[in-house]
Image (cartoon, rainbow, N blue to C red):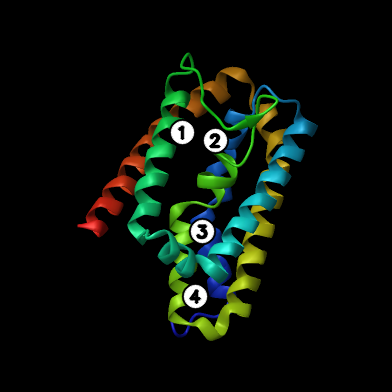
């Protein structure tokens, strides 16, 4: 961690945020919303995620300490939320329970845990703890990685539409199964770290 540069931190955060992995999930969650509105929602959620990640970079350790929470809590709670979302993707007849305004997702599940997920939050906490003098560098790397992720996700609805409904339904269920496995792993990692 001591030799991490701006570029390596940017690439690492970009890989953890994983915009290419998230674009199918996000577009599946927003499939009933027209493309232009979907792009506006994606932009808003990315800005909210950036605010959450920035808060954790600068005040995460103090915030967790103030609330009496430990780092594994992020992984366990994120795993539970992601598991519930993934169930709705695998079994589309299940009613999706999303925090929303006018039926549109707000903060959960797109801004967090899909973009500002437990892994990204934990990495930012680690970076800030190991090299507190480099917070400016970490913030620049965070801004760059979220900027690239936002661009990828903002462009994604047009590509997603061209795939067609049968293909996107199949992809959605496959991604749902993968997310169930990821959520269980997140939960088990959190429990393992806690124990």
Give the residue pinned by disc 1. 175
Sooner in the amino-acid sequence: mark 2 or mark 3: 3
Q: Disc 4, disc 1: CB below 8 Å?
A: no
User: Disc 4 to disc 3, how far (Cα)?
Assistant: 18 Å
Answer with left or right where residue 115 lies relative to residue 37.
Answer: left
Answer with left or right where residue 167 lies relative to residue 191.
Answer: right
User: Disc 2 to disc 4, how far (Cα)?
Assistant: 30 Å
For residue 40, which quarter of the picture? top right
Residue 20 x/y as whole percent: 57, 47
Which residue shows up at 58% across the image and 32% down it?
Answer: 99
> In this rendering, which labeled residue sits more in front, label 2 or label 4?
4
User: Disc 2 to disc 1, how far (Cα)?
Assistant: 7 Å
Q: Disc 2, disc 1: CB below 8 Å?
A: yes
Sooner in the amino-acid sequence: mark 3 or mark 1: 3
Q: Disc 2, disc 3: CB below 8 Å?
A: no
Which image quarter is the N terminus in? bottom left
Give the residue pinned by disc 4. 128
Which residue shows up at 50% across the image and 65% down it?
Answer: 60
Query: Could you classify mark 1 by the number of other residues whose Cα lies within 10 Å: few (under 14), some (14-19), or many (20 or more)?
Result: many
Which residue shows up at 61% across the image and 70% down it?
Answer: 141
> Is residue 13 at least partly visible in the picture?
yes
Residue 2 has which mark?
none
Give the residue pinned by disc 3. 15
Sooner in the amino-acid sequence: mark 4 or mark 3: 3
Q: Secondary structure at mark 4?
A: helix
In front of the other: 160 or 184: 184
For residue 77, which quarter of the picture? top left
Sooner in the amino-acid sequence: mark 2 or mark 4: 2
Q: Secondary structure at mark 1?
A: helix
Q: Secondary structure at mark 2?
A: helix
Residue 25 has which mark?
2
Answer with left or right where residue 85 lies relative to residue 22.
Answer: left
């Amino acid at each position: 961690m001591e030799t991490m540069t701006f570029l390596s931190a940017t690439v690492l955060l970009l890989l953890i945020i994983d915009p290419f992995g998230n674009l199918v999930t996000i577009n599946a969650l927003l499939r009933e919303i027209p493309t232009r509105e979907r792009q506006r929602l994606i932009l808003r959620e990315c800005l909210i995620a950036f605010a959450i990640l920035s808060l954790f970079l600068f005040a995460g350790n103090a915030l967790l300490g103030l609330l009496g929470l430990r780092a594994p809590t992020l992984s366990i709670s994120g795993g539970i939320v992601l598991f519930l979302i993934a169930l709705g993707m695998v079994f589309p007849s299940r009613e999706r329970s999303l925090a929303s305004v006018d039926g549109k997702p707000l903060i959960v599940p797109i801004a967090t845990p899909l973009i500002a997920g437990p892994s990204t939050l934990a990495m930012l906490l680690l970076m800030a703890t190991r090299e507190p003098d480099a917070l400016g560098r970490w913030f620049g790397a965070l801004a760059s990685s979220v900027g690239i992720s936002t661009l990828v996700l903002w462009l994604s609805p047009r590509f997603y539409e061209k795939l067609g409904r049968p293909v996107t339904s199949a992809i959605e269920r496959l991604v749902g199964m993968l997310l169930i496995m990821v959520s269980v792993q997140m939960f088990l990692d959190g429990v393992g770290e806690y124990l």
